[in-house]
Amino acid sequence: MTTTVSANRKGDRRERELVNALDESGFAVMRAPASGSATERELPDVLAGDGETFYAIEAKSSAGDPIYLTGEEVEALLFFARNFGAKARIAVRFDREDWYFFHPGDLYTTDAGSYRVKKEKALAEGTDFPEFVGETEKVTLAEVGDDGSDADASDPEIEERRTILEAVRDGHMPVEDAMDVL
């Protein structure tokens, strides 16, 4: 029982952390009361909006890997978001990592009907927090000009960007440092 209680406390702490981060980024945000246990209706963990876009967010965190959501959790999120006029998002946070966001349809579905997010997928394919709140925009190597042609090879600025992005991809440079340089 103490494991469940401490896991719930950690989940609550992570949800509050997400609410505070969204608030600091200019969103109107609220955490749903007990995320559904205080009512018979299933509610998302967090509601957030910036005046133009509104989100219903189910937040999950894990010390390990992977994070699972039941089919019922995802269905309830989608139902609420649709009726509320919000975009449904799954927010995941692994220890010592930032928050990453997914549309439920982008998650892996198991044979049993559950949804799964592995840490590697979150880091590689998830929308990171700065992009989610509109502070940055994801840039891929293809967008920088890695289309296989040598047309950009003579442009030192494009080549420098490519080198920086490859360093981030390969884990040789933190994203924050790359953002400062770019």
Image: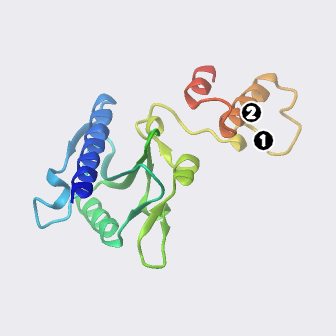
The Cα–Cα distance between marks 1 and 2, rounded to whole angstroms, is 8 Å
- Residue 155 versus residue 92: which sits nearer the camera? 92
Dot 1 corresponds to which residue?
146
Relative to 178, 116 lies left or right: left
Picture quarter containing residue 170? top right
Position of residue 132 measured from the top left corner of the image (x, y, whole percent): 43, 41
Question: Three-letter amino acid code at disc 2?
Answer: Arg
Sequence order check, earlier mark of 1 and 2: 1
Q: Residue furthest top?
A: 181
What residue is at 22 percent from the left and 55 percent from the top?
A: 2
Dots 1 and 2: beta carbons under 8 Å? Answer: yes
- Label 2 belongs to which residue? 162
Tell me if residue 174 comes above or below residue 117 in the rendering.
Answer: above
Front-lying residue, 59 or 2: 2
Count the marks.
Answer: 2
Residue sitting nearer the eye, 47 or 85: 47
- On the image, which quarter does residue 182 sit in? top right
Residue name at image x 16 percent, y 53 percent? 34
- Which quarter shows the N terminus? bottom left
